[in-house]
Amino acid sequence: GAVGVDSAALTFADELDLEALCGTEGAAVALLDHNVPAPAQAFLAPAVRAVVDHHDDAARFGEARPRVVAPVGSCATLVAEMLLELEGGVEGVNAALRLLLLSAVLVDTANLDASVGRATPRDAAAAEALAAGSDGEGFRAELFAALTEAKYDQSALGVDELLVKDYKQWQTATGVTVGIAGFGVPLGGVAEKEGGVEKLGDAVDAFATRRGLDVLLVMTAFYEGAAGASPFRRQLALAWARGGCGGDPVAAGLLQSLEASEDLVLEDISARSGWPAGCRVFEQRNLKATRKKVAPLMLRHFESSD
């Protein structure tokens, strides 16, 4: 690829016995883009030595060094700041690494678009430094267009692959296990990919059951047509609940809180969603509200219902 990385050389968490590795002498873990291990990886906690993240601070691992948790648009911004300081400026960072970091900053902040509401001055400064030597805005725009097209082309992914693509899971203060899956395909087209509504329901049920969930939310973000050149939309769905989407009191209480939130502005489109009966599907009118906004709302709901 453009940065000379062979995709076959990438290693993923499910290819390693992380628990065994953490049990070895001298094991050290750095949490990047999250500041608390996922429930399924709670065994990592004793080995955490560094934290770099841009989500809400859970105030754990105070002895970690470095421990950088700051409200920027992209975690890559924080990594870039640290690297630039360590190397004494942009000249000390190789071009491939700069391109990788810049790509992450642009994707996370929609090319520093102020109307999206994610970019901060620190993101802009990091992007400017990482793009040094290029023609600035023109280079960034071209790179962002290519990244956006690749990001939203998920046509080859099946339902299980979509659900796991950008998935996070929480154990709430009341012991409820909630997963939020994010992908870039309209919810109305997912059943077609799986071969019908019934098969979609079976696939979602299997996914949630394997992970021991009580509630599964799905969030999608996509362009109606050409990526970056057509209207952008967000949708949110209660895709699964242990007691059934239509009659689970835990899920019902959570949905009530989300529907009441002025941060999301949800419009119920369940009747025309193409999802199994009982699922609640919404058009999300506040396009700035990403999972970083929904997850804290969800956690606060369960804290207040304790």
Image (tube, rainbow, N blue to C red):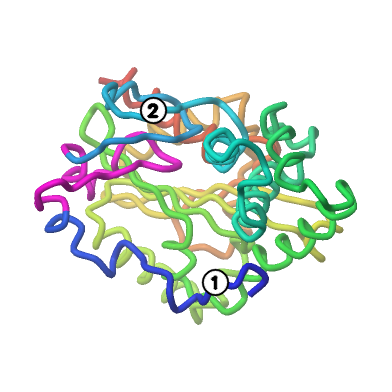
Is residue 290 visible in the rendered structure shown here?
no
Give how far across and how far down residue 269 sits, in percent: 63, 50
Q: Indicate the secondary structure of the residue bearing disc 2.
A: strand
Q: How many marks?
A: 2
Choose between 108 and 7: the one closer to the eye: 7
Q: Is-magenta flag for residue 130?
A: no
Q: Is residue 167 above or below residue 112?
A: below
Is residue 260 visible in the rendered structure shown here?
yes
> Mark 1 touching mark 2, by CB under 8 A?
no
Residue positioned 10% across, 53% down in the render: 24
Residue positioned 47% across, 71% down in the render: 159
What residue is disc 1 on?
5
Choose between 112 and 278: the one closer to the eye: 112
Give how far across and how far down residue 21 sits, in percent: 16, 57
The alpha-carbon separation of the residues under discs 1 and 2 comes to 28 Å
Q: Residue furthest top?
A: 304
Q: Is residue 135 above or below residue 42?
A: below
Is 253 displayed left or right of 210 in the figure?
right
Question: Which amino acid, by three-letter code, is at mark 2?
Answer: Arg
Q: Indicate the secondary structure of the residue bearing disc 1.
A: loop
Q: Residues within 10 Å of mark 1 (few under 14, many from 20)?
A: few
Q: Is residue 61 above or below residue 154?
A: above
Q: Residues within 10 Å of mark 2 (few under 14, many from 20)?
A: some
What residue is disc 2 on?
67
Q: Quadrant of the C terminus?
A: top left
Q: Quadrant of the N terminus?
A: bottom right
Say which quarter of the image contains residue 146. Answer: bottom right
Give how far across and how far down residue 34 sits, in percent: 40, 39
Is 41 displayed left or right of 274 in the figure?
left
Give the residues drawn in magenta, as a range: 22-46
Give how far across and how far down residue 227 sits, in percent: 78, 62
Question: Which amino acid, by three-letter code, is at mark 1?
Answer: Val
